[in-house]
Every structure is written in structure tokens, then in C-alpha cells.
Image (tube, rainbow, N blue to C red):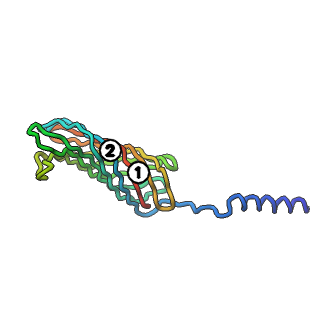
Amino acid sequence: MVAVSVAAVLAGAGRASAWPNPPPIHHREGFALTVGVGPGGLVGTGGKDALAGLGAGLGLAIKTTAGDDLLWMIKIDGESYLFRALDDQIKVNQQTILAAGAQLYVRKVLWIEGGLGAAVARQRDRKTGLDDHVSTGIGALFAVGYDLYRRESFVLAIAGCTGVGVYNKGMAAHGGIRLSVGWY
């Protein structure tokens, strides 16, 4: 009887000393804000010039939880790059997509997201800021990401993102790598 009591005390003491203050398990709930930036590219057809170039991208999202692993989101994502036109002027090509969609955690730190919405492709003069060409259409976003670091409500993630816009006179696709920070 004494041996059983001593064994129970030692077993309990061993567990307590192995992890004296376990960290709280953080569950995503409520709203989330994320901002991601990184290098990317844009290709497309239609319009007065074919699109093809490397530049930078930006993504902003507002999300809300729908379960432990599912978040609804509204996201704006885009790419832009500079190029020299035939008239020797510096121009900016860009595509932006505003979409409603979802983010699903398929593993604890691995997720996918997608959405549908409106797309805008613009070509403008860098010096004056005036648009040379604007197209509107429908767009889709898709991303695969990995949470590199999570601490309570803060998350640092890396993702491969892509967006496709279909316009009246062609289509454009952008893609890139985003390093993003978020707050849940």
C-alpha cells in the first residue's frame, strides 16, 4: 500500500516538474487582420500592350473565424511593376483583386485560402499618375501558406499567392511570395 502511494506521488511529481507552467493553447476567434508583402510577377494578354514583368506585391485581409480551422475573409491582393514603353516613358502595370473567400488550416500551421471577386488591371504613367488603360473584370485568388511563428494572437507566415483576372479583352495572372504578419 505504501509502495503504491509513493509511486503515485512520484509519477505526479514527474509530470509537474517536466512542464511546470504549460503555455495556454490559443484558439483563433473573432476577427483577424493580415498584411503581406513580397516579390512577384505579372503576365497577361489583351489591351494595347502585352503584360510581362517582375515587381512587388501586397496583400491585405480582414478575416473572421468560422470554426477552429476555418476563417472567412475579404482580401485585396495585387502586383505591380515598372517598365519602359515604346515612347520611352516609364509606365506602371498593375493588377488588383478584391475577393471574398475562406482560409482553411489543413494542418496546425499549414493553410490554403481562396476567393472570388472583382479584378482591375491598370497601366499608368509613372510621372503623371494618369491611367493609360484600365480594365475591369472578375478575379480569383489562391494561396498556400505556412505559419513560421505564432505567439498568442500574433502570427508570422510565408505564402505563395496567385491571382487571375479575366477581362473583356484578355486576362492577366499575378503571383509571388508574401511574408505576412497577422493578428488574431
Q: State the SS at label 1.
A: strand
Q: Position of residue 29 (x, y in %)?
A: 46, 62
Rendered residue at 43%/57% (across/down): 66
Image quarter (top left, top right, bottom left or bottom right) of the N terminus: bottom right
The answer to whether any part of residue 37 appears in the image is yes
Going from N to C along the chain, the mark reached first, 2 or 1, is: 2
Q: Position of residue 54 (x, y in %)?
A: 27, 40
Rendered residue at 77%/62% (across/down): 13
Q: State the SS at label 2.
A: strand
Q: Is residue 61 left or right of residue 154?
A: left
Give the label, 2 or 1, closer to the camera. 2
Work out whether residue 37 or residue 13 is closer to the camera in this orientation and state it: 37
- On the image, numbered disc 1 is attached to which residue? 103
How would you rate the neighbour count of disc 1 (Cα within 10 Å): few for under 14, some for 14-19, many for 20 or more?
Answer: many
Q: Which mark is residue 152?
A: none
Which quadrant would residue 88 be assigned to in this image? top left
Image quarter (top left, top right, bottom left or bottom right) of the C terminus: bottom left
Q: CA distance from mark 2 to mark 1?
A: 22 Å
Q: Is residue 127 left or right of residue 171?
A: left
Amino acid of disc 1: Gln
- On the image, numbered disc 2 is attached to which residue? 39
Rendered residue at 56%/60% (across/down): 25
Work out whether residue 57 or residue 109 is closer to the camera in this orientation and state it: 57
User: With respect to residue 161, does 15 lie above or below?
Assistant: below
The answer to whether the residues at label 2 and label 1 have Cβ atoms under 8 Å apart is no
Amino acid of disc 2: Pro
Q: Is residue 54 left or right of residue 15?
A: left
Work out whether residue 35 or residue 67 is closer to the camera in this orientation and state it: 35
